[in-house]
Amino acid sequence: MKNRIPLVLLNDVEDQISQHFSANELIDLTYQFAPSFNKHIPIEVPDYALFNNKKELLSKNLDALSDEQKVDFLSQIKYHSRLSEDDFLRDEIDLLVKDASDGVIKARNSVSTLLETYSIDLKNQWQRTYRFYDHLDYRNALDNMRLTIELLIKRITGSEASLENQKSALGKFFEDKDISKEVRNLFFKMLDMYEKIQNHEAKHNLPQNLNSKEIKFLMNQSTVIIKFLIDCDKGIS
């Protein structure tokens, strides 16, 4: 998936916000916000050895948040009294939030629509994945994402084998769809590594060893796998 937040616009918004607050105030704002998502900001003291200017300070602290959490932060700071007379900045924040929200909705709904052509259960399974993800319940988010992939593969191969035992059926499916050996091998390597990480970090344990960026990467990889399978099955070019 592409980044959900337009980076050029985000950089401009961060630059403008930093002009309204001191370094200490920017630290306080991000420090007070991050714990609500069980996050820790990297810069907690105004030490210029850690950053070159206030905009860089704000950027580094916001980088500790997911895209959705950045949007939440910006949606709240828009109403700060310091920004009450900066209509241009408030409009830019509105534009950024709209673009980011539209991106989230489109990305999720596009896969939901594809899965619904197979069954309502598959669509609901996918949507449960993101409900858990949005509530920071990464264990259940990853479990449900894995189950979505497993149910989809069972549907397209006609095999009731577990995800780990679908290689033979999937191999035949890809051959029937004229998928090259090289691409088949790449897909199976992706799926194999995905399964190993899932089994080690999420299936039997809380994903304590994975940070938010790694969780997001796994979610994105899952989406790539699902879309590729559907493209092959539906003959989408």
Image (spheres, rainbow, N blue to C red):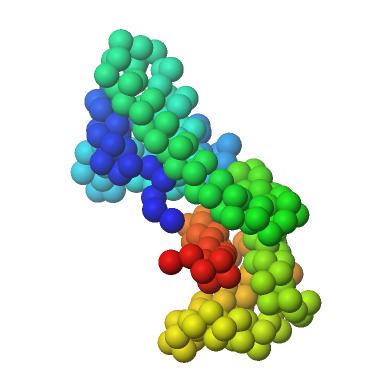
Extreme residue toward the top, this view: 85
Extreme residue toward the left, this view: 52
Which residue: 26% across, 45% down?
51
Q: In which quadrant will I find the N terminus?
A: bottom left
Extreme residue toward the right, this view: 160
| Residue 26 placement (x, y as % from top left) | 36, 31
| Residue 232 placement (x, y as % from top left) | 53, 71
From this viewpoint, is residue 137 visible? no
| Whether residue 213 is situated above or below residue 167 in the rendered picture | above
Residue in the foreground of this view, choosing between 49 and 202: 202
Q: In which quadrant will I find the C terminus?
A: bottom left
Residue in the foreground of this view, choosing between 6 and 200: 6
Which residue: 61% across, 50% down?
112
Which residue: 26% across, 41% down?
8
Classify residue 18 as left or right of residue 134: left
Residue in the foreground of this view, choosing between 52 and 162: 162
| Residue 27 placement (x, y as % from top left) | 39, 34
| Whether residue 111 is situated above or below residue 182 in the rendered picture | above
| Whether residue 215 is situated above or below residue 22 in the rendered picture | below
| Residue 208 placement (x, y as % from top left) | 62, 61
| Whether residue 167 is situated above or below residue 61 in the rendered picture | below
Q: How many marks?
A: 0
Classify residue 141 as left or right of residue 67: right
Classify residue 146 as left or right of residue 25: right
Classify residue 140 as left or right of residue 9: right
Residue 142 is drawn in which quadrant? bottom right
Which residue: 28% across, 48% down?
50
From this viewpoint, is residue 58 visible? yes
